[in-house]
Structures are given as structure tokens and as C-alpha cells.
Amino acid sequence: MPRIAHLLPALVKGGGERAAVDLANWQFGQGWEVAMIVGRYADEALLRSQLHPGIDVRYISRRVGRFGIYPAGLVWLLKERRWLSGFDVIHGHLSFSAAMLTSLGLWRRLAKLRRPALVETYHAVGMPIPAYARAVHRWMARLRDGFVLMAEDCHWREFRMGHAGLVEIIPNGLAALPALPSDHASVLAFAELAQLPTKDRIVVGNIGRLVAERRPELLAKTLCCIGRSMERSIHFLVVGEGPERAAMQRSFADADLGNQIHLPGLALDPRIPLSLMDLYISLNVGPVTGLAGLEAVHCGVPVIAIQLDERYASGADDWIWSDQSVEKVAAKALCLLGDSNARRELARCQRQHARACFSIEAMGRAYERLYADVLAARNGPA
């Protein structure tokens, strides 16, 4: 079995971090030797506690902040280069790890080493990244043995076509989550914390970091459009933290919906807020949704999405309907909210599809094949 080290900036709540942890756990369960290299320390209740205790976790620094890990990481690489060279694959996730992989790639080239192979998963697909940042990342990607996009992206299409042997698309996968009953004690306590009414209400929700890259303004516009058009008592549950929280509250206040938005902060177990939702509004890139959207599907919550790929047109075969227009997404939501049978049938079909196509096993096997390919290429003739 190959020796794999995953590289992350921090073990905090986020789609990229969650995907890395789930993949590491699956690989360890397959008998692989797995390590997790983490740039900086964070509250272990956020994500560290979800890693299998048998996985070796090493922190680059427990004291530096978000940007201090970059110089600290370079020093750490120099000290630990011998240990790192014992791995078959170093698999990086997110921007800090991209910089670290680039340094490793340059060092490996100078030292004329075959190992370790370097793989990166680019988790910012579809996000509003500045053009200069994408250009830098494309340059760095050329120093990888494998570069993975979790979805098709109009900004990366040309690069992918020009580097067919380097770039792979591997959708995120997720272990099946058993849903919690709506009268579970933890669900009732969370509803009280969020100040949600207990009776005669419809809840539309979302889970994610409230940061600009996740386009919370699109979510706010969509939810406000639903709220202005819905005659029944409707409430919006947006779970997560971030600097855009206040802006979202202002959007609802400006729409005279301030009493209908509920922002309870982080939830360590996503099943708890999902058990309160009648409909989930996700963000899609093409036909692919994020991990929180997959969690909603696995918990039996019907999902529709705001489409971030401006060139993508949702088709009849899409398992999650999406559109770039917030007005059209709101209209679709209103149609579903008025028909409980349609919501139940949509939730059933989506869960069946997700279990077949977006499981942790499917994602794990895809990475297993990728690792085998890049290691075979590294072991070829010098």
C-alpha cells in the first residue's frame, strides 16, 4: 500500500478540509499508511476530532496565524525533507498547500529525486478568484504530477485541454449520513438556539462559510426573493461563520425580512440543522455541488442550486436543478415549497443518485487510480 501525506493549512470547517479528512480516513481504513501535515493549530473540535486516531497528525506550527504559516512552512520543509521523501505521494489541498507543493517540486527537481509524487486538489473551482491568482496557480500546477479539479470549470477548461495528462476531474464524495429525527433532543435544542418557530413554518437553508469566495450575496438575494413572494410563514436558516455575516443580516433587514433570517453560527454536526430544513439552496459548478449540498442530500433534504458556471445550462438529466438567475432559482424554490410530495420525491431520487455516484468509495477509488498513474510515471526511465 502507498504511503500518503495530506497537506492542509488548518483543520477547520470548510469543504476542502472536510474532503481531505474524509479521504484520509477512507485511505486509512483501506490499510494505507496515512499522515496529515497541518499548517497551523485550530480548535480540535472543528475537524481534528473527525480524523481516525491512527492517522499521524503533524503541525507545522501551533502559534502562527493564517499568513505566518507560509514562512514557517518553508523552514519546516527544510527540516523535514528527509521524512517527507519517505512518502510515495504528498497530496495538497488549498492555497497554503499549493505553495508548499511548489517548494517541494523545486527541491525535488534540484535534488533529482523520483519521490514523493506531488498531487494537488484545487478546491476553488467556480469561486470568484482574481485572474492574477488563477494565473499563478496555473503556473504552480505545472510542477505537479497530478492536478485535480473537483468539477469542470470554465476558467480551467483551456488549461485542462492543454495538459490532458496532468489534469483530472474527481468529484467530491461523502460517506452516507443517517438523518436525525426532527424531534431529536439535539435538533430541538438547536432550533431553540436559532430562535426558529416550532410550528407552522417552512425552513429554507444553507450551510457554509460566510466568506466572499462562497458568494453569500447570491444566496442572500435568492432567499430574499423567496421571502418576498412566499405567503406562508417561511424562515431562512444559514449555518456558518465568516466576515460576510453582517452583510447578510443587512440584506434581510433591507428586504424587511429581518425576523425571518436565522444565523446561529457553526454547527459541528450538519445533520442537526439539516433536520430542520424543508429545502436546501446550494451552489453548483456545472452539475457538481459542494460537500454541504451532498450532506443535505444524504440527510433527505431536497436540493436546488445557484449556478456559478456562467456557461452552463441545466438540463433535464441534471440530478440537482440549477440556474444562474436568482429569480429563477427563487421561482423553482417556491414551486417546490408549495408541493410537499414533489419535495419528497426529489429528495428520494437525489439520495439514490448520490449514494451511487458521489460516495466516499467512488472518490477514494478515483484517487487510488490517480496515485497509481503518477507513481508509475515517476518510476519510469529517468
Image (cartoon, rainbow, N blue to C red):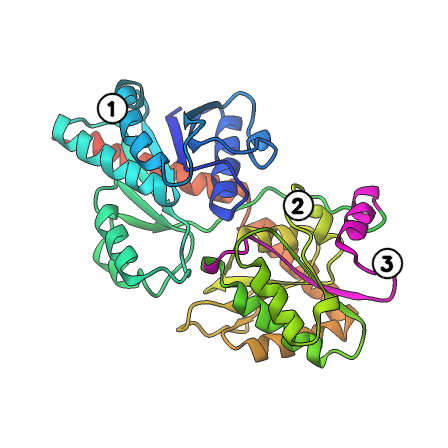
Residue 374, position in %: x, y?
Answer: 28, 37
Tell me the tag on residue 321: none
Pick the front one: 138 or 75: 75
- Which residue in the structure is indicated by mark 3? 198
Taking 238 as reference, is 357 left or right?
left
Q: Is residue 279 visible?
A: yes
Find disc 2 in the rendering and name its residue: 267
Q: Quadrant of the image for the N terminus?
A: top left
Disc 1 from disc 2: Cα separation: 38 Å
Q: Position of residue 372 (x, y in %)?
A: 33, 34
Question: Does 199 appear in magenta?
Answer: yes
Instruction: Work out whether residue 249 or residue 111 is closer to the camera in this orientation and state it.
Output: 249
Q: Residue at x 24, y 46 (%)?
A: 140
107 or 153, which is in the foreground?
A: 107
Q: Residues within 10 Å of mark 1 (few under 14, many from 20)?
A: few
Sequence-wise, which precedes: disc 1 or disc 3? Answer: 1
Amino acid on which disc 2 is placed: Ala
Q: Quick one: 142 or 237, which is closer to the camera?
A: 237
The residue segment tinted magenta is: 184-212
Label 2 neighbourhood size at 10 Å, few (<14), some (14-19), many (20+)?
some
Q: Secondary structure at mark 3?
A: loop
Q: Residue at x 86, y 66 (%)?
A: 200
Residue 161 falls in image quadrant? bottom left
Instruction: Tell me which numbered mark, 1 or 2, is placed earlier along the sequence.
Output: 1
- Counting residues from the start of the chain, the first of labels 2 and 3 encountered is 3
Kind of residue sitting beneath label 3: Thr
Circle 1 residue: 78
* Residue 314 at x, y percent in the picture: 50, 73
Dot 1 amino acid type = Leu
> Is residue 373 visible to the viewer in this orientation of the structure?
no
Image quarter (top left, top right, bottom left or bottom right) of the C terminus: top left
Q: How far apart are the two marked residues, 2 and 3, measured between alpha carbons? A: 19 Å
